[in-house]
């Protein structure tokens, strides 16, 4: 990029270098890249070639040069660490047990957690979606198996110790863990509370501690109570801080988390309603982090936040129109009024056509059955879409894209200790 730019500047004196143009940079703090969907596997079946490298390539292409891959079970934590080693300096990982994967603690769980780690079963399970999906809650009463608990916590401690023992620190956070009362059908409240509490105790006992990557959905009171039990009433024993990702709670809940020193992770789920967007507007810049939570949580046209993307495009078009009008005036002065008239007529014709507000995709999107090299897959959110998250946040808050990107970048580098 730099080379071709400087060549242009050296070679053609008419090309003005865009000296003040900001190049955005992003860190996706929550991307489930260990999900088999990024290998072309959907519900255990291969639907298209493994395009993980393309996914990472598109992310880097838009300026998302750092990806923190979520570990949400033993299997995905292990796979996330493998990916971090495969893409050194670009991919980092976390390790923890998601509330929706926490039934491994329960007495009725049919297999030992370690069995799902075997290589042969590698692609059989997707990562838990952080999109709320309340249905058929599982009744309490299956209880926690103490022997299972001891083995799980010992294995998690061992995994983290081994990962941290490596020369380069690929594992940058403890998590994803927390509470999700919107999806009790995956794991009962009783077992979720146990899982969160047991992992918090482990996180607090680490020396040095790791930053926390937390999930809280419809469970704010219990979530804060357990955090305080583990780290003190002001979280004063939480050495490295933490982020509550995929935030969809209320303004008061968000303020309480910020008061406790925690950071707020924003993705497509955070823009669903006008109330959600109002919460985003009130997140302090010094506490903001950005994420896609791919393959889940994409921004959809039905979301309140979508209108900020439409607005963004309209502004970009208006800016382009001003530029082309200036060019047309120059042309007219040069004696081409007829051409201009024609262009105006064409433009008027276009304006008369009623169109749904749409936002162009940077990359082609195809259905998984029609996979092609370089295209995104419909319904599979991926980290290159993080630029949409940043644009929507900028629109909601009425600040520049640069302010949003730089604040989120600095916050993320500070908490997760990722070199910039
Ligand atoms: Zn989550």
Image (spheres, grey):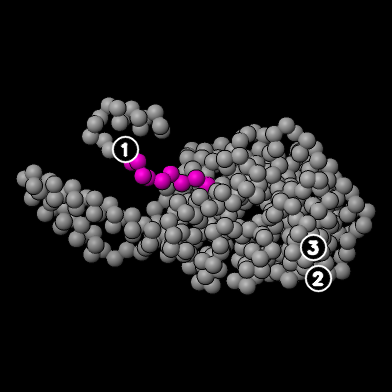
Residue mark closest to the camera, 2 vs 3: 3
Magenta-drawn stretch contains 167 = no
Q: In the figure, residue 163 lies in which quadrant?
A: top right
Q: Which mark is residue 232?
A: 3
Q: Above or below — where is 219 with respect to 11?
A: below
Mark 2 lies on residue: 139
Tell me the CA gap for discs 1 and 3: 54 Å
Q: Nearer the viewer, mark 2 or mark 1?
A: 1
Span highlighted in magenta in the image: 18-26
Above or below: residue 1 compared with residue 394: above
| For discs 1 and 3, the disc positioned in front in the rendered view | 3
Q: Residue at x 52, y 47 (%)?
A: 26
For the residues labelled 2 and 3, say whether their Cβ atoms are less than 8 Å apart.
Answer: no
Q: Residue furthest left?
A: 335
In front here: 158 or 212?
Answer: 212
Question: Residue 383, position in %: x, y?
Answer: 54, 47
| Residue at image mark 1 | 17
């Amino acid at each position: 990029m730099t080379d071709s730019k400087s060549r242009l500047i050296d070679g053609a004196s008419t090309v003005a270098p865009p000296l003040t143009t900001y190049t955005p940079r992003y860190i996706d703090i929550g991307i489930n890249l260990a999900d088999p969907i990024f290998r072309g596997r959907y519900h255990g079946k291969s639907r298209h070639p493994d395009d993980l490298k393309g996914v990472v390539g598109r992310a880097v292409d838009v300026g998302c040069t750092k990806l923190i891959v979520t570990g949400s079970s033993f299997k995905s934590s292990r796979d996330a660490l493998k990916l971090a080693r495969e893409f050194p300096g670009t991919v980092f990982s976390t390790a923890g047990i998601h509330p929706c994967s926490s039934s491994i603690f329960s007495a009725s769980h049919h297999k030992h957690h370690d069995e799902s780690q075997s290589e042969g079963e590698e692609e059989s399970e997707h990562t838990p979606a952080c999109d709320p999906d309340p249905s058929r809650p599982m009744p309490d009463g299956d209880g926690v198996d103490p022997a299972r608990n001891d083995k799980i916590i010992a294995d998690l401690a061992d995994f983290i110790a081994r990962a941290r023992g490596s020369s380069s620190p690929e594992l940058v956070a403890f998590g994803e863990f927390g509470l999700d009362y919107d999806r009790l059908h995956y794991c009962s409240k009783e077992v979720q509370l146990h899982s969160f509490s047991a992992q918090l105790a482990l996180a607090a006992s680490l020396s040095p501690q790791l930053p926390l990557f937390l999930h809280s959905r419809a469970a704010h009171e219990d979530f804060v109570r357990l955090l305080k039990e583990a780290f003190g009433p002001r979280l004063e024993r939480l050495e490295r801080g933490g982020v509550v990702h995929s935030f969809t709670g209320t303004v008061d809940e968000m303020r309480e988390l910020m008061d406790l020193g925690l950071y707020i992770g924003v993705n497509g789920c955070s823009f669903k309603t006008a109330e959600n967007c109002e919460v985003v507007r009130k997140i302090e810049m010094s506490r903001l982090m950005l994420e896609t939570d791919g393959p889940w949580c994409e921004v959809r046209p039905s979301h309140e936040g979508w209108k900020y993307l439409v607005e963004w495009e309209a502004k970009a078009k208006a800016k382009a129109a001003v530029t082309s009008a200036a060019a047309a005036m120059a042309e007219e002065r040069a004696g081409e009024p007829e051409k201009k008239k024609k262009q105006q007529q064409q433009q008027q014709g276009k304006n008369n056509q009623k169109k749904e507000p749409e936002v162009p995709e940077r990359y082609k999107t195809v259905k998984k059955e029609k996979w092609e090299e370089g295209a995104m897959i419909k319904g599979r959110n991926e980290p290159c879409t993080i630029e949409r998250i940043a644009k929507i946040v900028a629109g909601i808050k009425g600040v520049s894209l640069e302010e949003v990107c730089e604040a989120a970048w600095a916050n993320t580098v500070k908490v997760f200790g990722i070199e910039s």
